[in-house]
Every structure is written in C-alpha cells, then in structure tokens.
Image (cartoon, grey):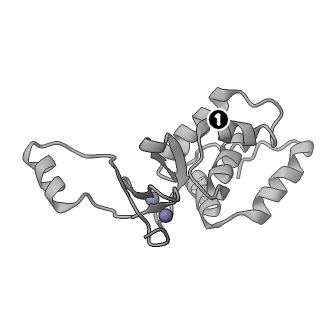
Amino acid sequence: MCYNITPNRLSIYFDFFIMKTTLQKKAIEFCEKNKHRISMPRLEVLRIIDESKKPIKAYEILEKLGKKILNPKPPTAYRAIEFWLKHNFIHRIESLNAYSACDAKHLHNGSQYLICDDCGDVIEAHQCELPIALKKSTEEISFIPRKWNFEISGTCKKCV
Ligand SMILES: [Zn+2]
Ligand SMILES: [Zn+2]
C-alpha cells in the first residue's frame, strides 16, 4: 500500500479507516488492485458523497472538503469527483446537477434514478444493462453504449 501520509494527517487517515463503509472499503481495494493513487482528497471526496443523505452538488463537496483539508482548490475536488464518476463509484444526477454514491453492490455503467417531485427523495433503480428496446436500437446502428443516465420524476410512496 502506498499512502501519502505525514504525521499530522495520520489521525485523519485513521479516522477514515475506522469509519469506512462498504463503498469506501471497496474503493480502497479497487485503487490498490488497479494501482491508482489513494490520495487524501480523493478518499475524502468519496466519503463526503457517500455520507451525504441526498445528492450533493460540487460546491457543497468543496465546502465540506474545506473542513478536512486546508483551503482545497476547486480542481482538486473536481478531479476527485471525475475519478469516482469514471470508475462508477458515484453517479451524476443531471437534472439536479448533483452526485450520489452508487447503491448497488457492484460497479456498473448506467445510472437510473427515480426522483420524487414532492419530497425530493432520490432512489437509485439499479440495472446493469440497458433496457432491451434501447439495447436493440443501439445494436442496430452498431453504436457501443458506455454510460447512460435515466432520470424519472414522479411521486414516491411516502408522498402518494
Ligand atoms: Zn449505481
Ligand atoms: Zn416523496
């Protein structure tokens, strides 16, 4: 393992390692296995998104990161967000311009969200594959889908 640890940061790392959730643990394993750097901003950004109860916007992530790291620069936060997005640990909810940690037990490419118009609850409706009708139409034109994003707005069962 190759962590960039200086003594004053050690306690924060310790804090990270004892509080890790399944997703955070999975992320550390993923980085070790694929030889990605496990930097503190990277881990903290994932943790902030993972611990947020609702989808979180980039500026809110940066604000929270500022409580962990002295004056984090916006590109530091954005690069970390991009990294986790690229590797499917988080999803971007386009209509809310916000990010959410993936709820599925494994990493997958597409993201499907049900967004309640009344209470604002966001539910991940996880599917690994594109719906058959769409898959067929991409195949017909030899298009290779890599990522996709569905957002369905409606009313959740609490608000019916
Ligand atoms: Zn997901
Ligand atoms: Zn609702």
Instruction: Give the farthest residue toward the left.
Output: 140
Q: In this view, does 49 lie above or below 143?
A: below
Q: Say which residue appears at 9% left-offset and 42% top-offset.
A: 141
Q: Is 116 situated left or right of 142 in this image?
A: right
Whether 159 is drawn above or below 51: the answer is below
Does the beta carbon of the residue at mark 1 sit less than 8 Å from ligand 1? no
- Quarter the C terminus occupies: bottom left
* Residue where numbered disc 1 is placed: 59
Viewed as shown, does residue 74 lie left or right of 72?
left
Q: Is residue 73 above or below residue 86?
A: above
Q: In this rendering, would 154 be left or right of 4?
A: left
In this view, the residue in front, 24 or 153, is: 153
The residue at the point 7 percent across, 47 percent down is: 140
Residue 116, located in which quarter of the rendered image?
A: bottom left
Q: What residue is drawn where x is 81% and y is 41%?
A: 67
Q: In which quarter of the image is residue 42?
A: top right
Q: Nearer the viewer, residue 126 or 119?
A: 119
Residue 134 place in picture, x, y as percent = 17, 53
Q: Is residue 28 visible?
A: no
- Residue 105 in the image: x percent, y percent? 49, 69
Q: Which residue is drawn at 56% across and 51% down?
A: 55
SS class, disc 1: helix
Is residue 146 visible to the viewer in this orientation of the structure? Answer: yes
Could you tell me residue 90's position as x and y percent?
Answer: 52, 51
Question: Residue 113 at what x, y percent from top left?
Answer: 41, 57
